[in-house]
C-alpha cells in the first residue's frame, strides 16, 4: 500500500457530503418501478453468486445493501462486516439492523484502505458505491481482502444511458462532486483483476417504468411483463448492452493454483 496514491481530499468531500445528508428517497421512489421490473433477475444473480459461500465471511463496501442482499434474500452468511466513510450512513445501517436477525459489524473505514488482513473474505459486495471511489485503488483493496476463489458482486450505474444523463442532470443535489458512473475504461479495471461477468440491467425499462408508474400500469401486469421481455433482449445486443442504466458485476478472484 506504500506507493498507492489516495486522494484524501476526495475522501473528505464524500464524507462531508454524506454526513450532511443526501436525501435519495424522492429519486428512488420515481425509479422504483423501473428497478422493480428487474428485481427478480437481480436477486437471482446475487443468489447464484453467493450460494457457494454458505457460512462464509461477507464484507459490504457501504452499509445499507446488506439489508436487501443478505437479510431479505436470506443469504446464509457466517459473518457480515460493513464499512462506510460516513458516520451518518453507518448509523443508518445500525438503525436498520435493530429490526433484523442479521447483525453486521459496522466499521468507519475508507474503502481505499481497508483495515482487514489479506484474504479475509469469501464475498465482497456493494450497491452504488464504487462510482464514489477511485476505482483502481478500491478494486485493488477488494482483491487483496478477498480469499482466492472468493466472489465480488456490485451493482453500479453506467454512464452511457441517455435517460440516466437526464436524471442525473435533473438531480444535482443528490450527487457528490466526485462520483463518476462507470465508463468503458472502468469495466476493464474489473477484468484485469477478476474473472468477470457483467449483467446490464434497466434499459427501455427506465423510461417505460417511469411512464408506467405515471399512467398507473399494474405492477407486474401486462405492460411491465412486456417491458421486462423487451429489456432482456435489449441487454443482449452487443454495443447496446452498455447503454443500460446499471450493471451487475460478478467477479471471481482466481485461486492460486488456477
Ligand atoms: C450512493 S451511496 C450508496 C450507499 C448504499 N450502498 C446504499 O445502497 O444505500 C454511496 C455511499 O458511499 C459511501 N462512501 C463514499 N466514499 C467512501 C469511501 N471512501 N469509503 C467508504 N465509503 C464511502 C458514502 O458514505 C455513501 O454511503
Image (spheres, grey):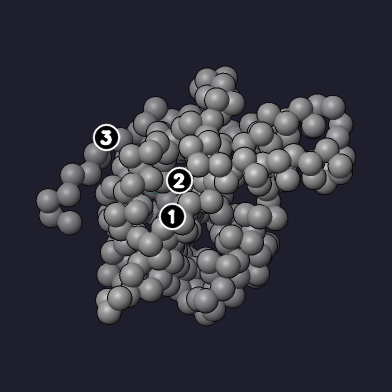
Q: In which quarter of the image is residue 211?
A: top right
For the residues carrying marks 1 and 3, which lies nearer the camera in this image? 1
Circles 1 and 3 in contact, beta carbons < 8 Å: no
The residue carrying mark 1 has its beta carbon less than 8 Å from ligand 1: yes
On the image, the x and y values in percent for residue 89 come to 50, 46
Circles 2 and 1 in contact, beta carbons < 8 Å: yes
On the image, the x and y values in percent for residue 238 come to 50, 42
Q: Quadrant of the N terminus?
A: bottom left
The residue carrying mark 2 has its beta carbon less than 8 Å from ligand 1: yes
**Tag 3 residue:** 9
Residue in view at x 66 percent, y 65 percent: 73
| Disc 1 crowd, CA 10 A, few/some/many (<14, 14-19, 20+) | many
| Disc 3 crowd, CA 10 A, few/some/many (<14, 14-19, 20+) | few
**Tag 1 residue:** 61
Residue 166's place in the image compared with 224, above or below, is above
**Tag 2 residue:** 129
Seen from the viewer's position, the closer of residues 149 and 9 is: 149
| Disc 2 crowd, CA 10 A, few/some/many (<14, 14-19, 20+) | many
Residue in view at x 60 percent, y 66 percent: 47
Amino acid at each position: 500500500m506504500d506507493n498507492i496514491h489516495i486522494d484524501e481530499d476526495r475522501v473528505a468531500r464524500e464524507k462531508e457530503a454524506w454526513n450532511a445528508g443526501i436525501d435519495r428517497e424522492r429519486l428512488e421512489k420515481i425509479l422504483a418501478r423501473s428497478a422493480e421490473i428487474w428485481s427478480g433477475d437481480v436477486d437471482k444473480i446475487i443468489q447464484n453468486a453467493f450460494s457457494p459461500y454458505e457460512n462464509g465471511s461477507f464484507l459490504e463496501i457501504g452499509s445499507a445493501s446488506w439489508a436487501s442482499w443478505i437479510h431479505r434474500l436470506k443469504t446464509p452468511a457466517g459473518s457480515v462486516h460493513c464499512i462506510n466513510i460516513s458516520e451518518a450512513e453507518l448509523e443508518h445501517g445500525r438503525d436498520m439492523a435493530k429490526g433484523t436477525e442479521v447483525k453486521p459489524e459496522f466499521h468507519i473505514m475508507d474503502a481505499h484502505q481497508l483495515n482487514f488482513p489479506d484474504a479475509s473474505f469469501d464475498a465482497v459486495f456493494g450497491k452504488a458505491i464504487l462510482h464514489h471511489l477511485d476505482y483502481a485503488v478500491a478494486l485493488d483493496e477488494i482483491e487483496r481482502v478477498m480469499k482466492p476463489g472468493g466472489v465480488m458482486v456490485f451493482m453500479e450505474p453506467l454512464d452511457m444511458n441517455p435517460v440516466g444523463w437526464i436524471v442525473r442532470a435533473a438531480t444535482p443535489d443528490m450527487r457528490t462532486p466526485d462520483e463518476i458512473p462507470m465508463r468503458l475504461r472502468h469495466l476493464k479495471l474489473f477484468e484485469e483483476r477478476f474473472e468477470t461477468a457483467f449483467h446490464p440491467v434497466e434499459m427501455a425499462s427506465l423510461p417505460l417504468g417511469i411512464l408506467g408508474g405515471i399512467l398507473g400500469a399494474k405492477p407486474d401486469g401486462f405492460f411491465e411483463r412486456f417491458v421486462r421481455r423487451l429489456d432482456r433482449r435489449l441487454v443482449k445486443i452487443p454495443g447496446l448492452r452498455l447503454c443500460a442504466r446499471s450493471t451487475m458485476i460478478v467477479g471471481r478472484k482466481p485461486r492460486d493454483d488456477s
